[in-house]
Image: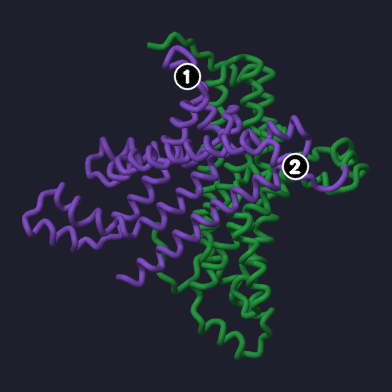
Chain colours: A green, B purple
């Protein structure tokens, strides 16, 4: 039925194989760096959402609502094309011309802010699942509010939150693929570049799919181990 | 550089709105098509027949681990090969969205059906209903009630996801914005406008679904 001859060798011929490997390396770097910032920012914002101080809570709620309700690609374009316009022209030109890999770091900004709003939501629901007694007990032993969060609730919440955070971690890797639109040379970009050189779009795209599949499987098995190791004793094992 | 100039939005308003219309069309196709395919897939995921269960499970887990952009590209390349001729961006994007979002709907539907206590099923069977009647009259109506908030949330996500059709050149809202930008070079105003419009639509939809969920909860 098909008048199409597959040529899978574009996946391992030179130079295409090297492009692909470079792309994978960039995807991993982009995902991991963005994840670190997203997690830090998300923990701060998520904690603010459950503090008793109303102004902090309002700001944090506005933050999560705002960044969750705009598509990531629109946010990325905003940071890449629009935001630098606010800067003076000389700084803007410096950013585009002199900063190495400016598009990479702008993607890190967009991706970590977007993901942090989702992480914050998970942190908030994790915090709310901790019983009120934990808070009261911590405060009654003379801990300050800050110490209570630092030593009691946040460590507990993070462990409860591992399964949903795993999902977010996987999502950030999938979302790194959007970076191709601003010219970051990651896996999806490379697969489309192979397409541009060889007209073998289906093969190149399938190759990229397999890369993401392998990343997902590695993350899932890694996080499974971590989850087992950090499980809070005494809680009912969280079913799948 | 001069200050803000929102005249660019006014001048290109009808062009931008035709992009927004395409976004809405794609979202509606993706949601309705995805839901229908998702119900079938979700039922298959619950089947006790291994030759139904395993292919559906592999398919769902496979697609859920891929970035949507790749799935869009993949169908963009596949559809013309299967059809033997180019069929246009909109059609290949629609197929990609239906197939991709169906896997997310399938998981919501599976979880919803599994949230119904087993006793309901046994009670239905003991009143001599058959499988179809049991599902149709007892389990699915109750499951639907639990699923609706998740289905609405997923619909908001799909609406946002349609912006990814940008990558194959489909003139949806984001693409039409970037076309205007390349002509007028007013990035700040244009992307701020796009962001605000997306925000207003998604925020309204998610607020409505939250309110509806609360009302539904108090009725029970």
State the residue lying farthest toward the left. B128
> Which structural element holds mark 1?
loop
Q: Chain of mark 1?
A: B
Q: Is residue A184 visible?
A: no
Depth order, front residue of A69/A97: A69
Element type at mark 2 = helix
Tell me the quarter of the image containing the C terminus of chain A.
bottom left
| Earlier-in-chain disc, 1 versus 2 | 2
On the rendered structure, is A150 left or right of B162? right
Horizontal placement of A161 versus A102: left or right? Answer: left
Please name which of the two marks, 1 or 2, marks the residue nearer to the observer: 2
Residue A9 located left or right of residue B219: right
- Please say if the residues under marks 1 and 2 sit with CB atoms less than 8 Å apart: no
Residue B114 left/right relative to B9: left
The residue tagged 1 is B87
The residue that appears at 59% across and 74% down in the rendered structure is A50
Rendered location of residue A231, percent (x, y):
50, 66
Q: Residue at x 42, y 16 (%)?
A: B83
On-image quarter of the N terminus of chain A: top left
Residue A179's x, y, as percent?
67, 38
Going 46% across and 60% down the picture, which residue do you hit? B208
Q: A124 or A35: nearer the eye?
A: A124
Q: What separation in Å lies between label 1 and label 2 (alpha carbons)?
A: 36 Å
On residue A77, the disc is none
State which chain disc 2 sits on: B
Q: Which residue is mark 2?
A: B7
Alpha-carbon neighbours of circle 1 within 10 Å: few (<14), some, or many (≥20)? few
Q: Is residue A187 visible?
A: yes
Q: Residue B7 location, x and y as percent?
A: 75, 42
- The answer to which image quadrant residue A181 occupies is top right
Residue drawn at the location 40% of the way across and 64% of the way down: B213
């Amino acid at each position: 039925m098909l008048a199409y001859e597959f040529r899978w060798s574009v996946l391992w011929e030179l130079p295409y194989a090297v492009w692909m490997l470079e792309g994978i390396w960039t995807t991993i770097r982009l995902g991991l760096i963005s994840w670190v910032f997203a997690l830090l920012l998300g923990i701060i914002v998520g904690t603010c959402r459950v503090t008793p101080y109303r102004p902090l809570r309002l700001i944090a709620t506005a933050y999560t609502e705002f960044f969750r309700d705009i598509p990531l690609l629109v946010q990325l374009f905003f940071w890449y094309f629009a935001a630098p316009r606010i800067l003076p022209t000389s700084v803007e030109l410096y950013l585009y011309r002199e900063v190495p890999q400016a598009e990479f770091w702008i993607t890190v900004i967009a991706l970590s802010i977007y993901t942090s709003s989702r992480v914050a939501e998970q942190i908030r629901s994790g915090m709310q699942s901790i019983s009120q007694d934990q808070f009261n007990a911590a405060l009654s032993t003379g801990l300050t509010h800050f110490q209570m969060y630092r030593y009691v609730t946040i460590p507990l919440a993070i462990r409860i939150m591992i399964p949903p955070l795993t999902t977010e971690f996987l999502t950030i890797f999938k979302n790194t693929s959007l970076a191709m639109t601003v010219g970051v040379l990651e896996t999806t970009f490379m697969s489309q570049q192979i397409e541009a050189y060889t007209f073998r779009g289906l093969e190149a795209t399938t190759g990229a799919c397999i890369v993401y599949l392998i990343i997902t499987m590695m993350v899932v098995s890694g996080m499974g181990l971590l989850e087992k190791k950090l499980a809070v004793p005494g809680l009912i094992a969280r079913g799948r | 550089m001069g200050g803000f100039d929102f005249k660019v939005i006014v001048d290109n308003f009808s062009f931008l709105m035709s992009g927004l219309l395409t976004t809405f069309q794609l979202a509606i196709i993706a949601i309705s098509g995805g839901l229908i395919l998702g119900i079938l897939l979700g039922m298959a995921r619950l089947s006790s027949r291994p030759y139904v269960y395993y292919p559906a499970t592999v398919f769902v887990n496979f697609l859920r681990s891929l970035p949507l952009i790749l799935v869009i590209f993949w169908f963009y390349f596949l559809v013309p090969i299967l059809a033997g001729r180019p069929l246009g961006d909109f059609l290949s994007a629609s197929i990609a969205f239906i197939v991709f979002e169906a896997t997310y709907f399938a998981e919501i539907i599976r979880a919803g059906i599994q949230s119904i206590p087993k006793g309901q099923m046994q009670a239905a069977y003991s009143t001599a209903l058959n499988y179809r009647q049991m599902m149709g009259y007892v389990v699915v109506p109750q499951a639907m009630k639990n699923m609706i908030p998740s289905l609405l949330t997923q619909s908001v996500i799909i609406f946002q996801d349609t912006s990814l059709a940008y990558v194959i050149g489909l003139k949806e809202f984001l693409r039409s914005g970037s076309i205007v930008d390349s002509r007028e070079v007013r990035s700040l105003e244009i992307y701020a406008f796009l962001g605000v419009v997306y925000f207003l639509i998604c925020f309204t939809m998610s607020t409505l679904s939250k309110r509806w969920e609360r009302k539904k909860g108090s009725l029970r």
